[in-house]
Image: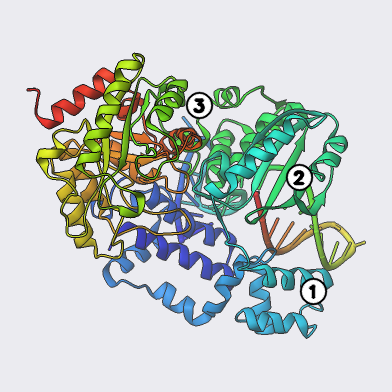
Amino acid sequence: MDKKQVIKHLETIAIYLELKGENAFKISAYRKAAQALERDDRSLGEIDDLGSLQGVGKGTKAVIEEFIEQGKTNTLNQLTEEVPAGLIPLLKLQGLGGKKLSRLYHELGVVDEATLREACESGQVEVLSGFGKKSVEKILKAIDEYGSRPERLPISSVIPLYEVIRTQLETTEGVERYAISGSYRRLREDVKDLDFIIATKNPEQVANQLVQLANVKEVVSKGTTKVTVVITGEWDVSVDFRLVEPDAFVTTLHHFTGSKDHNVEMRRLAKQQGYKISEYGVEDSETGQLHTFESEQQFFEFLGLDYIPPELRETGEEVESKIPELVELADINGDLHMHTTWSDGAQSVEEMINKSRSYGYEIIAITDHSKYLQVANGLNETRLRKQREVIREMNEKYEDITVLAGVEMDILPNGDLDFDNQFLSEMDFVIASIHSHFNQSEEEIMNRLEQAISNPYVDMIAHPTGRLIGRRKGYPVDLNRFIDLAVENNTIIELNANPNRLDLTWSWLRAAQEKGATIAINTDAHNYKMLDDMKVGVQAARKGWIEKDTVINTWSAKEIQHFLKKKKGELSE
DNA sequence: GCCGTTTTCGGCCCGACTGTTTTCAGTCG
């Protein structure tokens, strides 16, 4: 029994209560209890008294204990008898919340999508008080649209759209300031829509231009405070623009950056201090005076807080936590994973070096695929030795950058490595990674990873879980054990900066840092453009509360080489 | 159901929008 299961159980109870039409505060009490567990660093076993957690009281404590003991609870059992399970997915339909759904169930016997559609089409819904013709239209439209697009889109699929809109906003007349907000700004791995905040003194002028942005398929709403459009591309993406007075820009940006939990915490804290936060500013509850700000820094400072970077604004725990000095893009001094035309990359060794120099990097590793990966034109020992010659020449030619002769070596299905130790000892930098047999058991996968991690010539494990956000789950890894092994063996853990991967993910990065792991943020670039993914990678690291010193590619070339030598045991302590 | 530097009752984050009403509930972010 782990904490995640308990949290899920409590949240399920909340959903059922919602549908049953229970008191809203009772519902949120279950959600708060779940959150309290999530926010606590300790595992279930380490928490002596559940009741001591803020948000867990007599009732929820009993439920949690029952669940731990029995694996089920009377509370939920009873609820599932009272509320049809088919209602739950209907909560996802736009415009339908717990209360309306509950009425549809109790008064019309709606229990699932089919009965809901039937009730709408037969005219039963529109005569219900509180519903009308428009509600029915909206519900039917929501049913039709549901599932035509994934509920949330992987961040990688909306980054290009963001860039396109950003460019257009630069030249939109009447825009004084603008910024992206929402889960995109917090760098969630997937997002539902894009939210832009625009400061303007002339909202009508701006709104008129917004509805004419490139590829607008539908104008959902157009007012002087908000414009919503659907833009077509790979997917249809809903884009909100909030038009605000310049004075309110910062508090509106904060408000719509969220997360919801973060905002709740901020407001609770402000209230304690005698203030009321809204998107328009911070209001003194007594005098009614409204404070506005030039920057988010000032806003947080006003409430006596350190600046909280958007990436950290998730659970609300960040509000009263000490905020560490997070790694920044400017700290990055190198990139230790990239490919060239020798395997499946688009650019030559020298081209990748030159591009890396333009980023001001002091050190990079050229790491083409190894021979096992034939589809990627993987290199055998002979070709790697040849490539090493080229790299040696490059190191002579360019004095401002150190180029490590590396390899991204496959970990074979049986746990063997693609090269023997004798050969590996010739390499400057050895990455090991899994590219095959993703469907093995956790035991088999862990055996493969362990063989690699514990090999003294393996410096780093790349994209540890192999996942592709929204597309592929990855192979089963016991990440706690993986991190422990990496720490024990001084093996670097990669944060793969490719926005399709972001692997290891932020929550586990945080755990890795706490256990003392060394992390590298690498682009795994297969062409020029992908070297730019470092930006996203750094943001993902920040989301995992990662500090500069944890990240090996913020170190100097000398320090990195020292680390690598020490790992191979060439240097004594 | 939870909680207390307005403490055992009475509140629990805030505001816009929509669609339904004729002053407001529900939903959403």
- Residue at horizontal 87%, vertical 38%? A204
Q: Specify which label sits upstream in the sequence, 2 or 3.
A: 2
Residue A344 screen position, x and y as percent: 39, 45
Residue A306 screen position, x and y as percent: 48, 25
SS state under label 1: loop
Residue at the disc numbered 1: A129
How many residues crowd around disc 1 within 10 Å: few (fewer than 14), some, or many (20 or more)?
few
Residue at the disc numbered 3: A305
Q: Mark number for residue A214? A: 2
Q: Is residue A19 above or below residue A557?
A: below
Mark 1 belongs to which subunit?
A: A
Q: Are marks 3 and 1 in contact (CB under 8 Å)?
A: no
- Residue at horizontal 13%, vertical 42%? A455
Q: Quadrant of the N terminus of chain A?
A: bottom left
SS state under label 3: loop
Viewer-nearest of discs 2 and 1: 2
Q: Quadrant of the C terminus of chain A?
A: top left
Front residue of this view, candidates A305 and A250: A250
